[in-house]
């Protein structure tokens, strides 16, 4: 394996993966990315041109996808419409990219017999009660809540069907909430960090009791690379780093780290259908493939992320006003 086709490689997690691959492997990377509002070529700045090529294009473009897949040894498929709040406002792009886009890539992988790794989310499993002793495993039934998570669930099922019916050599990973550099300011942690930098109070949906299971994007990247290289074809692996926190705790940590009073935030309108809690049991990945996360300490990972947003205002500033105007229109 020498050349990877990474879809969505100019987005948050995809760009972190491309940086990780360049630093830790010999592989060359072709990024296929439509550079939607969520994609940013600056997220790939500084990477060697001899190893990383960015192709601006859509994963629903069958001819383009076919040509790029023919050149690749493996496809790692990150491209998606990824934000729950957007999916409640305007679901159609989620169907186009997450369903039709995944179908288009699978058809190319089938034709060229290309190894395929599909990036998915723990949100396909729905949510857990706060006091539920169980966490999500590979056996948990699918029960998605939002237009976003239902299209991701649909894309997972397409991957399984193309594996079983057409022999596509595919693996799937479902990861929990990522944090780290290059995340769009629409998402929870970067929104609150950049709010504080701009003198805006952080915004907590509802009571702030919802729990997310945080993992650093670098740990997600190392897990994906492990599955790509050692995972069993046809299998699903859950990725998580035991990082459960409720949203209120995370906002308080951000405020404290940024030198503000811990209660200097506002409660705003809750998200419709807001999932209560996600939690991942990643035993299979750890025991079968020997993966372990490196960013065990959420507080220091968060502090490094805050420092990154302070140091890289030119990366996020162009999106900030537009994003806040969208939230303000919804009372959030
Ligand atoms: P993101 O929104 O930051 O990035 C998505 C990228 O895909 C962008 O660069 C965008 O330009 C590109 N894209 C969108 N539509 C496209 C199309 N039609 N053709 C080509 N490119 C297109 O998303 P992210 O947070 O980096 O998520 C990446 C993947 O990881 C998604 O599949 C998401 O479901 C999954 N995931 C995310 C998280 C998380 O916490 N963010 C957790 C688990 C899984
Ligand atoms: O301003 C906010 N205030 C707030 O309280 C925002 C933007 C969010 N929230 C809450 C909603 C969630 O409980 O914070 C939590 C995290 O919100 P998001 O960052 O929007 O993430 P989430 O909806 O949990 O989904 C994320 O993780 C799973 C990614 O966006 C998905 O792509 C991934 O599949």
Image: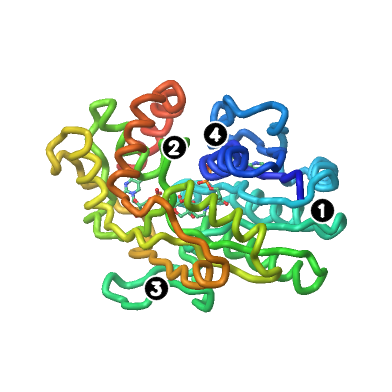
Whether residue 130 sits left or right of residue 58 in the image: it is: left
Q: Nearer the viewer, mark 3 or mark 1?
A: 3
Query: Foreground residue, 47 or 197?
Result: 47
At x 15%, y 39%, the residue is 264
Disc 4 to disc 2, how far (Cα)?
17 Å
How would you rate the neighbour count of disc 1 (Cα within 10 Å): few for under 14, some for 14-19, many for 20 or more?
many
Residue that numbered label 3 is attached to: 135
x and y percentages locating residue 81 in the rendered image: 56, 47
Disc 1 to disc 2, how far (Cα)?
32 Å
Q: Earlier in the sequence, mark 4 or mark 2?
A: 4
Disc 3 to disc 1, how far (Cα)?
35 Å
At x 43%, y 70%, the residue is 281
How would you rate the neighbour count of disc 4 (Cα within 10 Å): few for under 14, some for 14-19, many for 20 or more?
few
x and y percentages locating residue 134 in the rendered image: 37, 77
Q: Which mark is residue 108?
A: 1
Q: Nearer the viewer, mark 1 or mark 2?
A: 2
Residue that numbered label 2 is attached to: 181
Disc 3 to disc 2, how far (Cα)?
27 Å
Residue that numbered label 4 is attached to: 37
Q: Is mark 4 within 8 Å of ligand 1?
A: yes
Q: Nearer the viewer, mark 4 or mark 2?
A: 2
Where 163 sits versus 178, above or below?
Answer: below
Hey, which quadrant is residue 36 in on the image?
top right
């Amino acid at each position: 394996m020498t050349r990877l086709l990474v879809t969505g490689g100019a987005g948050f997690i995809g760009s972190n993966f491309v940086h990780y691959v360049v630093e830790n492997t010999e592989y060359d990377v072709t990024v296929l990315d439509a550079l939607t509002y969520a994609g940013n070529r600056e997220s790939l700045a500084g990477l060697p041109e001899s190893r990383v090529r960015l192709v601006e294009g859509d994963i629903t473009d069958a001819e383009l996808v076919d040509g790029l897949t023919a050149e690749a040894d493996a496809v790692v498929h990150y491209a998606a419409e990824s934000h729950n709040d957007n999916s409640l406002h305007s679901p159609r792009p989620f169907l186009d990219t997450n369903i039709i886009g995944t179908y288009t890539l699978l058809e190319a992988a089938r034709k060229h017999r290309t190894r395929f790794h599909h990036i998915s989310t723990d949100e396909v499993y729905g949510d857990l009660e706060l006091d539920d002793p169980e966490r999500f495993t590979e056996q948990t039934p699918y029960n998605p809540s939002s237009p976003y998570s239902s299209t991701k669930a649909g894309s997972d099922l397409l991957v399984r069907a193309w594996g079983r019916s057409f022999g596509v050599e595919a693996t799937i990973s479902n990861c929990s909430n990522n944090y780290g550099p290059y995340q769009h300011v629409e998402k929870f942690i970067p929104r609150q960090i950049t709010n504080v930098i701009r003198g805006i109070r952080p915004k907590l949906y509802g009571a702030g009791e919802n729990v997310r299971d945080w993992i650093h994007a670098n740990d997600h990247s190392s897990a994906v690379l492990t599955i790509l290289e050692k995972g069993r074809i046809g299998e699903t692996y859950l990725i998580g780093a035991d990082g459960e926190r409720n949203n209120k705790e995370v906002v308080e940590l951000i405020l404290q780290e940024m030198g503000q009073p811990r209660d200097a935030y506002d409660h705003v309108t809750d998200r419709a259908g807001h999932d209560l809690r996600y939690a991942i049991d990643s035993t299979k990945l750890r025991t079968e493939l020997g993966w372990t996360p490196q960013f065990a300490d959420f507080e220091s990972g968060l502090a490094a992320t805050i420092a990154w947003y302070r140091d890289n205002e030119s990366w996020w500033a162009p999106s900030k006003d537009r994003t806040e105007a969208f939230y303000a229109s919804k009372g959030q």
